[in-house]
Image: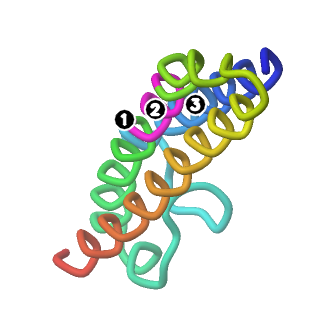
Amino acid sequence: MLLSLVEYIFLGFLFMGLSLPLIQRRVKPNPWYGFRTRKTLSEARIWYAANEFSGRLFFVTGLLMVMAAILFLPFGLIPHVGAAIYLGACWLTFTISLIGVFLLSFRYIGKL
């Protein structure tokens, strides 16, 4: 259980750390890092706006991951089923957050 807690907290901080350069508009258009679509790679203005927006969402996702890992920990202490509940709750938080990031980011890019 402790290992899962550390992994989810690490994953959350990793997301937050990787999102900061995007939020600060320090990542130039490239084929490796950032929210890469044909539209974002077509124009620098769109690239920076889209990546700042998606970076903010990824930061929130990372924050939610850390919070979920800590807040759901008491459920992990329930005998026999606790670990499954804890891992499921953290996994759902992660998955739903990522789906939200992608849907909201594509919707935002469509408006640019």
Please tell me whether mark 3 sits on a helix, a strand or a loop: helix
- Residue type, mark 3 in image: Gly
Query: In the image, which disc is placed on residue 20?
Result: 2
Residue 70 coordinates in the image, percent (x, y): 54, 17
Q: Mark 3 — residue?
A: 12
Foreground: disc 2 or disc 3: 3
Residue 47 lies in the magenta stretch: no
Rendered residue at 47%/84% (across/down): 38
Relative horizontal placement of residue 96, taking residue 111 as reference (left or right) = right
Relative horizontal placement of residue 49, taking residue 86 as reference (left or right) = left
Q: What is the quadrant of the N terminus in the image?
A: top right
Rendered residue at 30%/68% (across/down): 46
Q: Is residue 1 above or below residue 46?
A: above
Q: Mark 1 — residue?
A: 24
Residue 95 coordinates in the image, percent (x, y): 54, 56
- Measure how far apart labels 1 and 2 are at the Cα level: 6 Å
User: How would you rate the neighbour count of disc 3 (Cα within 10 Å): few for under 14, some for 14-19, many for 20 or more?
Assistant: many
- Residue 5 sits in quarter: top right
Relative horizontal placement of residue 53, taking residue 55 as reference (left or right) = left
- Residue 104 sits in quarter: bottom left
Give, as a single range, the part of the protein colored magenta: 60-67
Q: Earlier in the sequence, mark 2 or mark 3?
A: 3
- Residue type, mark 1 in image: Gln
Rendered residue at 66%/33% (across/down): 11
Query: In the image, which disc is placed on residue 111?
Result: none
- Measure how far apart labels 1 and 3 are at the Cα level: 19 Å
Please tell me whether mark 1 sits on a helix, a strand or a loop: loop
User: Closest to the observer: 45 or 106?
Assistant: 106
User: How would you rate the neighbour count of disc 2 (Cα within 10 Å): few for under 14, some for 14-19, many for 20 or more?
Assistant: some
- Residue type, mark 2 in image: Leu
Residue furthest to the front: 79
